[in-house]
Amino acid sequence: MRKRLGRARDTLAANPTATAVGIFGLVLLFLVATPASWQTSTLRLAVPIALAAIGGIFAEKSGVINIGIEGLLIVSAFSSIIAVHRLGDGGATMGLSNLWWGLLIGVLVSVVVALVFAVVCIDFKADQIIAGLAIWLISLGLAPFVSRIVFGSPNTAGISRFGNVTIPGLSELPILGYLLFDTEPQVYLMLAGALGGWFLLTRTTFGRWVVASGENPKALDTAGVDVRKVRYAAVLLSGVFAGLGGAGFALGTLGTFAGGGDTAINGRGFIAIATYLLANYHPVGALLGSFLFAGLNSLQTALQSAGYAIPTELIRTLPHMSVIVVLVLVGRTRLPDAAGEHYESGED
């Protein structure tokens, strides 16, 4: 049995295609075997995980390990709720719904925090892991602090959420109809982000620069491309994706933000890191992998609602336990050669 598990792990780690096929098979099984309510819940819960994972791919592929993704999700989520509350819930500004303005402000706040992280790591050459942890811890304390100032409580007030976008005709299709053509805007952002991230990383010159920056920055520098600018762009891009994930989750699924404890994000940024490692840094694979973790999160909620005689604390560990199992099975995912290393132009 141990040998079989070892062979399975080696196959998954050495063959990204096998990993993607395995994940896709799990997703298909999920679509066929689960109730519609669970399917739609999983799709919405996957939004912050998938988009944060895609952002993490760009940062790490460029050579910057951004484990502060959790912090970016937190700041974008709570700032988007506060923005909508201040602008006027249910209203519009300059002809655009305040929900969309809230989404934009959440993304901008995430990008600003990502910029601070980039300056500290790239220009000041701080340890990337410690800097990422600092971003997370600061966000963890900042969210309830700002919420107390605005609302007098660590939890924000509730606001209206994005409504479903229904595409006539297509929404009547079995399974895919209610999943993809009668759903909230943040789900479309997630799908577009996965496809856009894949295209940008694998089909553009910028994507090749990002990969070279993480694998052989000296060669990229010799070719006349500024490694520092490429890494800055990749980290800022991780801020954009994480901002879309955090703000989209808050405005489309939560409608509020709980700042106490682990906050409403509840470790989804760290799960996103496991997701892109599972996907071997493939944006579409990260999208599919996010369904696995989001499905377990949805199962956790379903078990609690059904009132099964299982300790709540045990049920809540399901998504996080699955991360450990996945990392054991895919334990040999290869990091970019220069990930975590600082580079100065002209270095020997």
Image: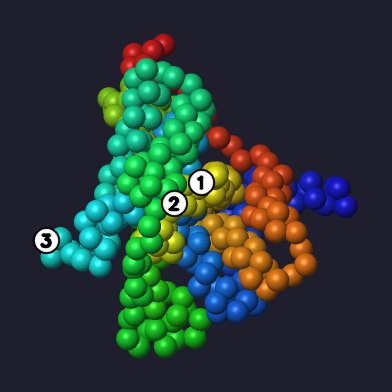
Name the residue nearer the viewer: 11 or 36: 36
Distance from disc 1 to disc 2, alpha carbons, whole Å, reads 7 Å
**In the rendered structure, are the residues bearing label 3 and label 1 in contact, judged by CB atoms less than 8 Å apart?**
no
Instruction: Say which element carries label 1.
Output: loop
Vertical order, 209 against 289 (above or below): above
Residue hosting label 1: 260
Assess disc 1: are there few (<14), some (14-19) or many (≥20) residues with their C-alpha within 10 Å of its C-alpha. some
Image side of residue 19 versus residue 46, left or right: right
**In the rendered structure, are the residues bearing label 1 and label 2 in contact, judged by CB atoms less than 8 Å apart?**
yes
- Judged by depth in the image, the label closer to the viewer, 2 or 3, is 2
Work out whether residue 204 can be spotted.
Answer: no
Decide which of tag 2 and tag 3 comes sooner along the chain. Answer: 3
Distance from disc 2 to disc 3, alpha carbons, whole Å, reads 29 Å
**In the rendered structure, are the residues bearing label 2 and label 3 in contact, judged by CB atoms less than 8 Å apart?**
no
Instruction: Say which element carries label 2.
Output: loop
Name the kind of residue labelled 1 in the image: Gly
Vertical order, 107 against 341 (above or below): below
Classify residue 102 by image quadrant: bottom left
Name the residue nearer the viewer: 149 or 254: 149
Residue 24 image offset from top left, x and y in percent = 58, 64
Vertical order, 257 against 63 (above or below): below
* Residue sitting at x 68%, y 73%: 306
Residue hosting label 3: 94
Distance from disc 3 to disc 1, alpha carbons, whole Å, reads 34 Å
Name the residue nearer the viewer: 225 or 177: 177
Name the kind of residue labelled 3 in the image: Met
Work out whether residue 42 can be spotted.
Answer: yes
For this orientation, the residue located farthest to the front is 152
Residue hosting label 2: 155
Residue 5 image offset from top left, x and y in percent = 80, 50
